[in-house]
Amino acid sequence: MVSLFVDKGGVLSNPMSFTVTGALPGVPQITAITPTSGNPLTEVVISGSGFGNIEGTVLFGGSPGPVESWTDTEIRVFPPNFAGSSTLQVQVANGAGAGNGVSFDYLAQYSASIWVPGLTSPWAIAMDQSAWGIFVAYGSATYEIKKYDTTTQNTLIGSWTTISGSGNCYGLAVEPSSGNLFFSTANAAPYKIVEYNSGGTAQVGYGLLQQSPPESGAYGAGVALDSSGGVWVCDQTNGAVEKYTWDGSNFVIANQATDWLLGFSTSPNGGPFGVAADNRPGAGYIYITDTSMNEVEKYLANGTFMGTLISGANAPAVPRAITVAESGHILVTQTTAADLRIKIYEPDGSLVKEIPMDPSWFWMSLGGIAVDKLGNIYAVHTGGAVWKLTPSASASWPIPVRQRR
């Protein structure tokens, strides 16, 4: 609490009490950074004091990073992009100036390891950010979905559920607040979108995949959830992307009187395949891969087309899986047989980085991808494994057993 006066010609008025709410900015002091290394996909938590409640700037080696949240004692931020690995000084700057510097190791490359081996025809993958787990769907006699730990290699959290009789699964999505899992089915009718509870013990609901008017042979591929609870499914067979909403008993296509996103190619192995939602505050975008056009299309959650986001020389060839990192970066797989890779883009569609898959591991194909808050990327090798790509100072892949001497 402070006292306020009016000064008129050197004569002060009577004092009035005034309470200051919120923290006044002092010189910022960083006491801890977690983690102490990473890349632009890594959420960095900065703890300290004197940051103020008005957002300032976080500098990584003098370059500002995009801020996710800001309070007087904690900031969540993502590093900006740099060409090479180096140790940077991180500072918080506000109206009172820039504070002390703390070291942060910027890691421009990735080190690869087999995270989950021995799977049968895996494809879809989804990240459960709240529980540090990844869901993986793979083909077997029972078409299973299993959940694995992201902190300990090849650690099964549980044989989560079974999609018996429902065909292959090419799309998985996790609802952040509830932890419920949504997936689509393909290859065996009836084609469905299904929701299970977070423990995998009960089916919450489902809906048949269809356009309006209904057609036969809807083929569910990618799945994404928008911030309003809408479920987006790529229907590759019919060259469409459909949005489903819950009517209290089933998932039904939004606005039955109007077809949703049509006009994609329906050529063999073409058309819309992957879909991802950017649900960050102020975003609300839906991204869709078009495997025939080698493009990524951008929509609003109400179905409004915003234009082609990624195309041309920097676009992935035969793009399939797509995901959005917490930082807003867009990750897309390139699935041409001779040049499998993951491409990382800024939200505006500009190319940041390419990660080629080591061909000595004889990849059958590159399936789904997911990314955690530390910037680790999980990539499905459809030949039977999930790979983990960890931020590193230099790129490295393990040597295949058959090549070791």
Image (cartoon, rainbow, N blue to C red):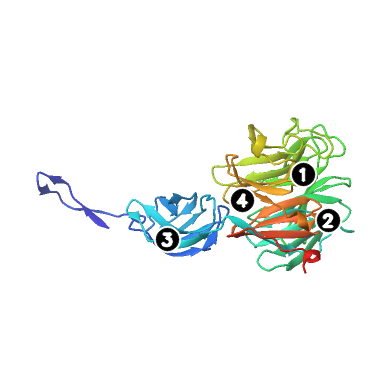
Query: Residue 153 or 285: which is nearer the viewer?
Result: 153
Horizontal side of 258 relative to 353 (left or right) equals: right
Which residue corresponds to mark 2?
Answer: 121
SS of the residue under disc 3: loop
Which residue is labeled 3 in the image? 73
Tell me if I can see residue 179 in this picture. Answer: no
The quarter in which the N terminus is drawn is bottom left
Which amino acid type is shown beneath numbered disc 4?
A: Ala
Q: Amino acid at mark 2?
A: Ser
Task: Point out the tag, 2 or 3, that comes first from the N-terminus.
Answer: 3
User: Mark number for residue 336?
Assistant: 1
Identify the residue at horizontal 86%, vertical 51% (top origin). Answer: 166
Please report whichever mark, 4 or 1, sits nearer to the chain's N-terminal start.
4
Q: Quadrant of residue 312?
A: top right
Nearest-to-viewer mark from 3 and 4: 4
Amino acid type at mark 1: Thr
- The amino acid pointed to by label 3 is Thr
The answer for how far apart the CA atoms under marks 2 and 1 are is 18 Å
